[in-house]
Image (tube, grey):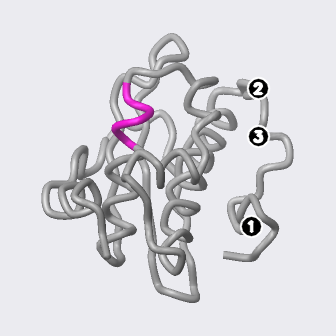
Amino acid sequence: MYSEKVMDHFRNPRNVGEIPDADGVGEVGNPKCGDIMKMYLKIEDDIIVDVKFKTFGCGSAIASSSMATEMIKGKSINDAMKISNKAVAEALDGLPPVKMHCSVLAEQAIKSALLDYSKKNNVHIDGLEDFDPDEDPHGEEI
């Protein structure tokens, strides 16, 4: 049912924890399933130099959070903005259809943390103009 990558990121999640002096913090949740993701970013010169997460949820939510942090660590803000839920799911070698919302939450957590960073630092980030952390990219409430 789950790929080896999903199981690996669930059993050995990367980048778990908090960044006390984070430059951006985002928290998103899905009331339907109870998953909650919180992501912390440390940004220097528009590069995400560190990222941590805390997730309360199922194995797919933890794996999606872990993979998402791996995908954006060391990347520019603009590259992080390009990470989609489909990219997270593909990097995990797929998620069952009923668990795809976990990858949506991971994408939303990245954007939510970047939105927090942009507000704190009065920085414009392309693509965040219409971002609503309470709505998924497909228009469904999460």
- Decide which of 12, 44 is in the foreground and name it: 12
For the stretch drawn in magenta, the main secondary structure is helix
What residue is shown with label 1?
A: 135
Residue 50, quarter of the rendered image? top left
Residue that lies at the very extreme toward the top in this rendered image = 45
Q: Residue at x 77, y 64 (%)?
A: 138
Q: In which quarter of the image is the C terminus?
A: bottom right
Which amino acid, by three-letter code, is at mark 3? Leu
Mark closest to the chain's N terminus, 3 or 1: 3
- Decide which of 134, 138 is in the foreground and name it: 138
Please check the rendered image and state whether residue 70 is part of the magenta-colored stretch, yes or no: yes
Quick one: SS at disc 2? Answer: loop
Which amino acid, by three-letter code, is at mark 2? His
The magenta span reads 69-73
What residue is shown with label 3?
A: 128
Quick one: SS at disc 3? Answer: loop
Which amino acid, by three-letter code, is at mark 1? Glu
Image position, residue 33 (x, y; %): 50, 86
- Decide which of 50, 79 is in the foreground and name it: 79
Quick one: SS at disc 1? Answer: loop
Please check the rendered image and state whether residue 6 is part of the magenta-colored stretch, yes or no: no
What residue is shown with label 2?
A: 124
Q: Which residue is drawn at 68% across and 60% down?
A: 133
Q: Are marks 1 and 2 in contact (CB under 8 Å)?
A: no
User: Where 128 sits versus 142, above or below?
Assistant: above
Characterize the local packing of mark 2: few (<14), some (14-19) or many (20 or more) Cα atoms within 10 angstroms: few
Q: Quadrant of the N terminus?
A: bottom left
Calculate the distance from the C-alpha at mark 2 to the C-alpha at mark 3: 8 Å
